[in-house]
Amino acid sequence: MKSDVEDLMPRILPVESCDTEEYNSNEPPRNPQEYLRQVQREASLCPEVVVAQIDPKKLKKKQSVNVSITGCLAAPQGLSPSLKWQQQQVSKFSEVRQSVNKHRQHWKSQFLDDNVVMPKTENEDGWKRFCLGENVCLDIQLKEEDKVNPGLDYIKTGFPPFLSIVSKLSQSTISAVLEYLINWFEERDFVPQLGRWLYALLACLEKPLLPEAHSLIRQLARRCSAVRANLESKDDERLSALNLMICIVARYFEQNDLADKE
């Protein structure tokens, strides 16, 4: 006699009824017939209805809530760029992207120097050190003479985003490195090395944007606006770079709700 389950899910392979006295479930099946009998027996032992035991208290402790700020913080008075300046930056950025695309294959084929070892895509700490340098990542305070003549120790100062480097990055790696650097920026101040790499990665980011990239660049613009909101002078060396990042995200990548208004 067939069960209700067998009526809904008829047997595909004929299996003879299993004699539980002759069958030893502790021994491995010796042939296909015994294997099918073992599967049949294990299925018969499963309860028809299974109810998961869930502790609501644990769920409340572990659940997370993501809160997204829609727009950027307004710039302090006198620190917001003009519309003309923004249009000029978008035009220059567009030219840079065209140049990168035009020469990508050439630079992609170039060999890197022996001291340039790019981390694997999933190596977040490695990429932070590669782009920003150990001095920034490890918060090493430089001596005055080192500031005047830092030299070309890229391990300490970070590798610049040369075309021979960024042209070798796939879109998935570009998105990953963007995420690593933006996450680093969320907890730290803006530094020149960060600005150079963000600009280069954005110049290599293909349109239309994937949802992950779309979210990342909006996060970047909001963070830049938060840092800018605490600036006290238009002479602050970070201002131009922060305005540029917001401008590129909002004007070039058409996130218009984040744009600075005159």
Image (cartoon, rainbow, N blue to C red):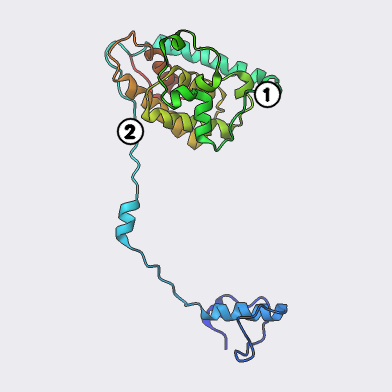
Badge 2 element = loop
The residue where tag 1 is placed is: 108
Q: Residues within 10 Å of mark 1 (few under 14, many from 20)?
A: some
Foreground of the two, 9 or 18: 18
In the rendered image of this protein, does residue 146 appear above or below residue 207? above
* Image-based side of 80 in relation to 176, left or right: left
Residue 36, image x, y percentages: 66, 78
Q: Is residue 257 visible?
A: no
Q: Quadrant of the C terminus?
A: top left
* Image-based side of 47 in relation to 230, left or right: right
Residue, x 52% and y 80% (percent of image)?
45
Residue 54, image x, y percentages: 36, 64
Identify which amino acid the numbered label 1 is placed on. Lys
Q: Residues within 10 Å of mark 2 (few under 14, many from 20)?
A: few
Residue, x 53% and y 21% (percent of image)?
200
Q: Earlier in the sequence, mark 1 or mark 2?
A: 2
Residue, x 33% and y 58% (percent of image)?
58
Mark in the foreground, 1 or 2: 1
Q: Is residue 201 visible?
A: yes
Residue 165, image x, y percentages: 61, 23
Q: Quadrant of the N terminus?
A: bottom right
Residue 46, image x, y percentages: 50, 77
Q: CA distance from mark 1 to mark 2?
A: 38 Å
Identify which amino acid the numbered label 2 is placed on. Ile
Badge 1 element = helix
The residue where tag 2 is placed is: 69
Foreground of the two, 261 or 103: 103
